[in-house]
Amino acid sequence: MNAMAQLAEWDSFYVIVASAAGALIGLQFVVMTLIAINPPRGGAEAGAAFATPTIVHFSVVLLLAALLRAPWHAIETVAILCGVVGLAGMGYAAIVARRMRRQATYQPEFEDRLFHLLLPLASYALLALASLAVLSHAREALFGVGAATLLLLFIGIHNAWDAITYHVFIHLPKSAGPDRKEPPKKDGP
């Protein structure tokens, strides 16, 4: 079976993955809007290090799904584009590492480094390597691209959940302080 026919077999996978990524991007915008009501001090730097990469990973999942479902005539074009995305993602991981070191709002733990640096770097590296293997091992390379895409989706889900739980259980209670008062009740409609 030729590489283009093998790629066509991934249609349902990319429809499902892209739909999930698109919905999660929308939810991230809602969450960021809610967090913006009571932003933490230094939140912009922390956001660049922790929140923005989540949107980037979800967006890359959408991009890969679109690239892999476009009506290409040759697999080489898809391979080159996936390789470029993988290399760009590896470069972006270096930017995220620098942003994590520079921000002072939150002290990253091992789990943060794993899900914000190491796993994304591994995913983008897998994507770049898979793009090199497409011509000689198309089936295996397509599984590599699929694994990288799914890993980015799961990384984004983990990081989004982690950010939400941080704000709900850590930041909001600290910002409310010990003398937190109930809002005044309204009389009438």
Image (spheres, rainbow, N blue to C red):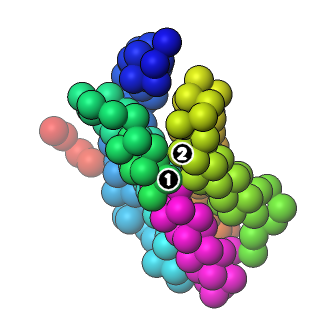
Judged left or right of residue 132, residue 106 is: right
Is 14 rendered above or below residue 156?
A: above
Identified by mark 1, the residue type is: Gly
Give me the disc on residue 7: none
Q: Which residue is mark 1?
A: 83
Residue farthest to the right, as pictured: 110
Query: Residue 59 at what x, y percent from top left?
Result: 39, 49
Identified by mark 2, the residue type is: Ser
Q: Nearer the viewer, residue 60 or 155?
A: 60
Query: Residue 43 at what x, y percent from top left?
Result: 50, 76
* Dot 1 alpha-carbon crowd within 10 angstroms: few under 14, some 14 to 19, many 20 or more: many
Say if the magenta span includes residue 86.
yes
* Dot 2 alpha-carbon crowd within 10 angstroms: few under 14, some 14 to 19, many 20 or more: many
Dominant secondary structure, magenta: helix
Residue 107 quadrant:
bottom right
Q: Which residues are magenta?
A: 85-106
Is 42 rendered above or below residue 152?
A: below
Query: Residue 187 at what x, y percent from top left?
Result: 23, 45
Residue farthest to the left, as pictured: 189
Judged left or right of residue 56, residue 97 is: right
Q: Nearer the viewer, residue 80 or 30?
A: 80
Say if the magenta span includes residue 89.
yes
Query: Residue 5 at what x, y percent from top left?
Result: 41, 16
Tag 2 or tag 1, which sits nearer the N-term?
1
Q: Nearer the viewer, residue 130 or 1?
A: 1
Marks 1,2: beta carbons within 8 A: yes
SS state under label 2: helix
Q: Which residue is mark 2?
A: 131
Question: Residue at 81% across / 65% down in the picture?
Answer: 109
Judged left or right of residue 185, residue 138 is: right
Q: CA distance from mark 1 to mark 2?
A: 5 Å
Question: Residue at 49% across / 73% down in the picture?
Answer: 48
